[in-house]
Amino acid sequence: MRIGFLGTGVISEAMIRGLCDVANYKDPIIVSQRSVERSETLAKQYANVEVSTHNQDVVDRSDWVFIGVLPEQVPLVLSALNFREDQRIVSLAAGVSLGVMRPLIAPCAELYRAIPMPPIEFAMGPIAVCPKNEALEAFCNQVGVAVSVDDEAQFNLFGAVSALMSDFFEHVAGTSQWMTDHGLDRTTAVRYSTALYVALADLTMREHPERLHAMSESCETPGGLNAQFRKLRHDRGTPRSLIEGLDQILQRLEVGNPQDGSER
């Protein structure tokens, strides 16, 4: 199977690296020249990756086409291309609905949305898919954990939660910086904080879904350190800010087209 990428951004690169390095994917991968440096680097590193200077050539030579251009570029890029009826199109463009995409890829009828995250480079993390499709899920499971829904409104919930990524990185960095500010060597601080967050995340994956909400209280003792810290965060309104932030992102995604074209 030949796959093509229109737009070679961070997410497209992560998917290609995950496929080649972890999944041992050997079939042809055709990438558009944008970005030039990233696409040429991938072609040099992987024998099955080829750069094409024309988007139509990427489409013509691909069985599956991944749309990785910026959201505001989708109408302009796709309206200039001719797709085949027998192709499968997977849009990675954040906030661009299936309804917006369908007339742009006609006569092709197989259209899906997906939300890969950067850890797929190491075959880790979720890949949201809409609508459900066994073949696409099997493909995504090579580099992550496919989580599929048929309802696009529910799919937007995945999109909203994916916006937690930069806040999470800031949280981990802030924890490390706090230890550094108190005299701990930076490398040691980072090693401890990153290992802590990885371990805690792993525990949540091992817990039954019905028990996840109780994990906070189960690790606390009355008047203990965990209880003290969580109470302060609650008093400062941190849980409420999480819900309000997610609600705002969801409202933006439900419009169908992001206002500023940012990916996530």
Image (cartoon, grey):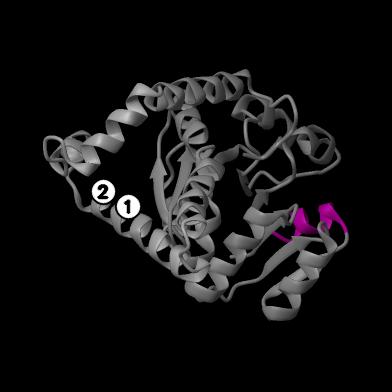
Viewport quadrant of the N terminus? bottom right
Within 10 Å of disc 2 (Cα), the crowding (few <14, some 14-19, many 20+) is some
- Asked if residue 64 shows in the view, the reply is no
Picture residue at 69% right of the left edge, 79% below the top: 45
Give above or below for 26 relative to 128.
below
Which residue position is annotated with label 1? 201
Residue 217: mark in rendering: none
The amino acid on which the numbered mark 1 sits, given as a three-letter code, is Ala
Identify the residue at horizontal 43%, vertical 54% (top origin): 125
Taking the image as drawn, is residue 247 in sight? yes
In the image, residue 251 lies at what x, y percent?
Answer: 56, 18
The residue wearing badge 2 is: 204
| Magenta stretch, residue numbers | 54-62
Circle 1 packing at 10 Å, graded few (<14), some (14-19), many (20+), is: few
**Position of 252 relative to 210 (above/below):** above
User: Residue 191 magenta-drawn?
Assistant: no
